[in-house]
Amino acid sequence: MTADDSFGRLDDDDYPACTMGRAAEMLGTTQGFLRAIGEARLITPLRSEGGHRRYSRYQLRIAARARELVDHGTPIEAACRIVILEDQLEEAQRINAECRRSAGPANPPAAV
């Protein structure tokens, strides 16, 4: 991959562009917190060729939500489970909305 290809992917929410140190700094947390939510299987960072963890913007948003819950006193395991359930609910709602749109109006207009 060339440098130009990498720069083009920075807009991709799933592109693992952020190192663990930078991710922890951006989230205002520790690298240990990132490891803990990885161990709880909330997020699975990709690894660089050297084996270093890399995080995507999507993963950073998920980690930020978990941190918010932990900061309010929720145990980390419970926070991870809550975030997973919230993510699943959001996905189910998106799928339902798509199904409704593709099915068309529930009550078609009456013929005149």
Image: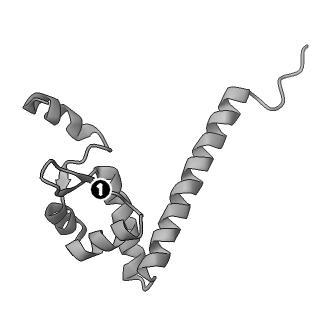
Q: Is residue 32 visible?
A: yes
What residue sits right under mark 1 in the picture?
45
Q: Is residue 43 above or below residue 91?
A: below
Q: Is residue 29 visible?
A: no
Q: Residue extending furthest top?
A: 112
Q: Residue extending furthest front?
A: 50
Q: Residue at 41%, 63% (x, y): give it.
A: 42
Q: Residue extending furthest left?
A: 3
Q: Is residue 54 left or right of residue 50?
A: right
Residue 78, percent across and down?
A: 49, 77
What residue type is disc 1 on? Pro
Local SS, label 1: loop
- Quadrant location, the N terminus: top left
Residue 67, percent across and down?
A: 35, 73
Task: Give the image's coloring scheme.
Answer: one colour
- Quadrant location, the C terminus: top right
Q: Quadrant of residue 45?
A: bottom left
Residue 13, percent across and down?
A: 32, 44
* Total numbered labels placed on residues in the image: 1
Q: Residue at 21%, 62% (x, y): give it.
A: 23
Q: Nearer the viewer, residue 16 or 53?
A: 53
Q: Nearer the viewer, residue 51 or 93?
A: 51
Q: Is residue 109 above or below residue 40?
A: above
Q: Residue at 16%, 29% (x, y): give it.
A: 5
Q: Is residue 32 above or below residue 94?
A: below
Q: Residue at 50%, 62% (x, y): give it.
A: 84
